[in-house]
Amino acid sequence: VLERWPEAWPHLKELTRNGTSVTNTIVGSSPSVTPAVHATIGTGSFPEDHLLVDTRLRVDGEVVDAWEDISPSLLRQPTLADLYDRAAGNVPLVGLVSEHPWHFGMMGRGASFPAGDNDIAVAFSAQGKSITNPSIYSLPASGVAVPGLEDAIRDLDSEDGAIDSRWMGGELEGNAKGTPAWTTYQTRVIESVITAEGFGQDEVPDLFFTNYKQLDLVGHKFNMTNPEVRLALEYTDAQLPDLTALLNRTVGPNRWVMAITADHGQQPDAESLDAWPIGVQELAEDLAEHLGVERDDLVEGTRVTGLWLDREVLSGAGATLGDAADFMLDYTIEDNASDDVPADYSSRRDERLIRAAMPASRVADVLDCSQKASD
C-alpha cells in the first residue's frame, strides 16, 4: 500500500527519517491475519507457540472466534505488557483503544493473567458502541460515547464539496466505521483515554496500544489500487502529528517512545490484475457434491487456507479427511469455474488448482518432509 501510494504518507516518512528503523528484515506468518499477528506483536512468539493461528479456531469440536466473548483464553503466551505490568506490581497504566477485540493480543490478558489486573481495553461494536469484557479488562468512562464522531463524519462528507451523507459514492450513514471518519474519531477517543486516565503522569513508564483498522477495512471493500485506499492512508498518516502533539502535551517532549508497525499488508483484487481467484465457496460445494452430502452439513467454515469439515458427516459419507484432501489435489481450474473460464486460462483448464492439501494433523509431517527434501 505504501508503495502504491508513495505521496500519501508524508508524516510517516518524516518519523522514519528522524527516528530509528529496522530495515532489511522481514518477519511474517501464515495466514497473515489480525488476531495471529497482533498476538505475535504482543508476545514476541509465532502462532505455533501462542496458538492464535487465525481469526477462527476449532475448539472442542466447535469453530469459534479467536477472541470469543472478548476473552484471551486461547492466547497461550504472555505478552510484554502482561510480564512488565506484573513485575512492576501493576503500578504501570496499560491500555488499548482499537476497532476490534482481535487487536487485544497486542496488549495482553488483563486480569486473566496470573497476578494481573483489569487493564484498559476499548473496542467498538458494529454499531460503534464502546465494548470490552469487564471481568478481564476495564472500560473507563473516558472511552465511552466520546464526542467528535459527528464532526469527523461531516468533515469527511464535505471533502467533495457537498454535504450529502456520501463518501466516494457510498452511503456514510451507519457506515462510519468503514471510512476514514472513524480514523479521525479514534484519535479523539485515544486523546480522551490518555488524558483522563493519567497516562505518562509519573516516573513509571506506561504502555498504550492502538490499531487504526480503517485502512484495512477500506482495502477489503474497495481494493488497494483504488483512490479510496489512498484517502484512507492519508487520513491514517495525518493522525501521527496529532498523536505526537498529544504525547508532547500530556507526557512531555522527549519523555515517550512511539513504535509503529503493521500487522499485515494488502494485495490487489485478482480481477483488477486480470487474474482469477480460487472460488472457495465453489470448492466447498463441489466437495460436498462429490461426497453426496449437503454443503451446509459438511462445511463448518471456510478460510483462504482451508475448510473446516464436520467429522461425523464426513464419516457418515464413508470418507476421511485424507479423502477430502485427495479430492482437492485432483481439483482443476475447470472444476472451480462456476462461469466461463477467463480467456487467459482457457488453455489451462486441466491444470490442478491446489498444489498442497492435507489434514491439519499432517501439517507438521509435511513441513518436516519438505525441510528434509530441501536440505
Image: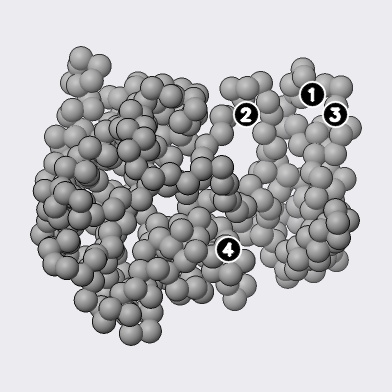
- The reply to whether dot 2 and dot 4 touch (C-beta < 8 Å) is no
- For disc 1, the neighbor class at 10 Å (few under 14, some 14 to 19, many from 20) is some
The image position of residue 13, as x and y in percent, is: 36, 32
Q: Secondary structure at mark 2?
A: helix
Q: Is residue 191 left or right of residue 118?
A: left
Q: Which residue is mark 4?
A: 47
- For disc 4, the neighbor class at 10 Å (few under 14, some 14 to 19, many from 20) is many
Q: Which residue is mark 2?
A: 270
Q: Disc 4 or 1, which lies upstream in sequence?
A: 4
Residue 210 appears in the picture as rendered = yes
**Could you tell me which residue is drawn at 58 percent across and 63 percent down?**
47
Q: Which residue is mark 3?
A: 349
| 165, 40: nearer the viewer | 40
Quarter where residue 46 is shown: bottom right
| 51, 164: nearer the viewer | 51
- Three-letter code for the amino acid on which mark 1 is drawn: Tyr
- For disc 2, the neighbor class at 10 Å (few under 14, some 14 to 19, many from 20) is few
Q: Disc 1 or 2, which lies upstream in sequence?
A: 2
The image position of residue 360, as x and y in percent, is: 73, 64
Give residue 345's mark.
1
**Could you tell me which residue is drawn at 62 percent across and 52 percent down?**
30
Q: CA distance from mark 3 to mark 4?
A: 36 Å
